Amino acid sequence: MTFLVNYWRNPAGKAPVEKYIDEIINKEERAELLSALKGIQEYGKDTVGVEFRRIEGKLWELKIRTHGNQHRIFYVVLKGNEMILLHAYLKKTPKAPIREIETAKQRMKQLMEVRQ
């Protein structure tokens, strides 16, 4: 199953995950991350170099390794194959920090309220 990847936008129209990717200084690393997201659109869960993990309920996490860094992107899937990227961070600890998960949950809640 392939996905239609979209960015969650706050009420002001800003997309935090898109901003996170744009702020990656290393151009090759940024290109690898964007390539992984494109792969998800084309190959779904069979994308090489990407791990998918359920966090809780409808909240999932993408694990993408680039240039020795571990990027994490929280997402939710709506209407069959629409993947909405909610929140991203650079992993530095063994477990996902609670505040990162809470940020993603809050954005998911806001998204669900708008989509109802």
Image: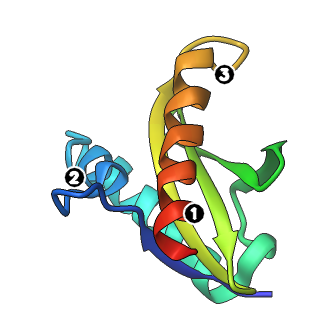
Residue at position x 45%, y 57% in the image: 33
Residue at position x 44%, y 59% in the image: 32
Residue at position x 75%, y 86% in the image: 80
Q: Position of residue 19 (x, y in %)?
A: 24, 50
**Mark 1 — residue?**
112
Q: CA distance from mark 2 to mark 1?
A: 26 Å
**Mark 2 — residue?**
22
Q: Residue furthest left?
A: 12
The amino acid at mark 3 is: Ala
- Point out the frontmost of discs 2 and 1: 1
The amino acid at mark 1 is: Met
Residue in the foreground of this view, choosing between 72 and 49: 72
Residue in the foreground of this view, choosing between 17 and 34: 17
Element type where label 1 sits in the image:
helix
**Mark 3 — residue?**
96
Q: Earlier in the sequence, mark 1 or mark 3?
A: 3
Q: CA distance from mark 2 to mark 3?
A: 22 Å
Look at the image and tell me in which quarter the C terminus lies.
Answer: bottom right
Q: Earlier in the sequence, mark 2 or mark 3?
A: 2
